[in-house]
Amino acid sequence: MIKKKDKAFEKFLQGIEVVGNKLPDITILFLFAFFIMLIISYILSFFTFNYFHPTSGEQIKIINMLAPTELVKLITVMTHNFITFPPLGITIVATLGIGVAEGSGFVRIILVKLLSIIPKKGIAPAIIFISVLSHIVSDSAYVILMPIASLMFFAVGRHPLAGIAASFAGLAGGFAASYTPSTIDPIMQGFTQSAAQIIDPSYTVNVLCNYFYSFGSTFSVILICWFITDKIVEPFLWKTMPLDEGIVPEDTSASSTTTTENRAFKISLAVFISMVVLLILLLVPENSLMRSPDGSLTSPKSPAMQAIVPLLFLFLVIPGSIYGVMTKTFKTTKDFSMSMSGSVKALASFITFSFFCAQFLYIFGKSNTGTLIAISGADFLRSLNMPSQITIFGIIMLTACLNLLITSASSKWAILAPIFVPMLMAVGISPELTQAAFRVSDSSINVVTPMFAFYPLIISYCQKYCKKTGVGTLSSMMLPYSIGLLIVLMVMLYLFWGLNIPLGFESGYTYPPTI
């Protein structure tokens, strides 16, 4: 009976892959979506909607993006939309650093050392653990970890796409399950507190109001992603996605390293560690230049948070360059520059996608279509007047549906917090619990929606091993993770709630708070 269910699920995934891969290229999909959204904005602009923005109080009105004034405005901001597309700069800068570290051989020697201490069966949990931990470096982790994860899997004879999938799932799960605070915490807290003060002007929300839940969930996230990788995704990939001919893994055995390489690695690693120590010493003082004016390290306004990507670039380039020079991989300055330019060539499709995606997101937001979708959905949920446990479940499901279209956590919460938080406070649910419920679905659905900004980049990583990889391939192999993450994160939330374990610092489940 179990085998029949497994085969049925496998056929279901294959169906998603086949249908998805028959779709046009993801760049073309966004081009289609761009024109469709223009037409939708034109049609909806003739209707009056009885919805009001929760902060401004103004009635929601769809702006006709085909109006001459809006078309002129669109043309004038196209370049600005493109160059300010959030993942674009992060991806290019981080990729330049990766190019140096990989071109010099520094990445390879790191893999050799890691594989010498990590058993083959421990590769998956190790990758997932590192991925969960790495979300602290924000979106740049998507650029750095996945190529390394695929190489590590491939080096021990495992499917490289399974390494990418495990890393992707761990990173996405890390936004609701994390060992450390990150830049998203103060952003979420700011929206939550402002929304709570609509009902109670004296209410404050701790920036780490979900930390205990987040930390506790890491264990279940690692276990479920490990199980899905080994038992579902990798077997599925070997059956449906054979590797392209001629692709051979590099020799990553310890015996393949020379005395010169080992010496260069030790010196490069010492430089890397020295850089880490120096950075820590710069961050510790309360009057550090790397802190925000209020002394915070995790605030989006702090230089430490704003400099994460440039710092990653330096942490890759400097040790990588030293290793390249010592091993004579970099014999001339041209070798150094070629390592960076070669890595950027792989981003051609992603850069093309970024241009069209940026234009689509502009008209989707400017037309108020996204705001209308969010507010109307929340209003429907409110009208159902359900018990607290079911209401929270509804919040999770509604956010999951919205996340298929609007993948930015800050953008969604900026709209939804002023609706959800006061609405649930009125029925006795705390702002901290509402925020945690939002983060559950936001973390789990990112991995399965083609609207996620890094989807084209991840597809390009997969195509290094399987050229036929498309949207359907990535969606089908990530769907089990999406389901698994949604279930375990939701179970953990209800477990914390049922046992009355604090979600975080100064955090409860009811409003007004019970002492």
Image (cartoon, rainbow, N blue to C red):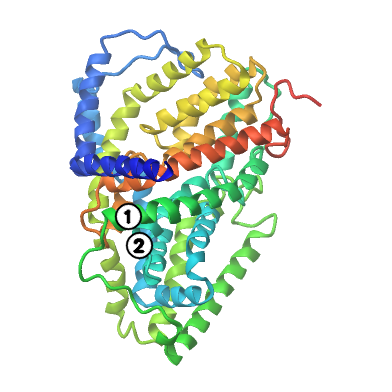
| Residue 138 seen anywhere in this rendered image of the structure | no
The residue to which callout 2 is attached is 159
Q: Secondary structure at mark 1?
A: helix
Where does the image place residue 280, in percent across and percent down from the top left? Answer: 63, 64
Where does the image place residue 311, in percent across and percent down from the top left? Answer: 49, 62
Where does the image place residue 273, in percent across and percent down from the top left? Answer: 57, 73
Residue at the image position 39 percent from the left and 86 percent from the top: 327
Residue at the image position 40 percent from the left and 85 percent from the top: 256
The residue to which callout 1 is attached is 237
Q: Amino acid at mark 2?
A: His
- Above/below status of 383 relative to 490: above
Label 1 vs 2, first from the N-terminus? 2
Label 2 crowding class (10 Å Cα cut-off): few <14, some 14-19, many 20+? many
- Above/below status of 78 relative to 110: above
Q: Amino acid at mark 1?
A: Leu
Where does the image place residue 240, in percent across and percent down from the top left? Answer: 27, 53
- Above/below status of 79 relative to 97: above
Residue at the image position 34 percent from the left and 40 percent from the top: 8
Q: Could you tell me which quadrant the N terminus lies in? A: top left
Q: Could you tell me which quadrant the C terminus lies in? A: top right
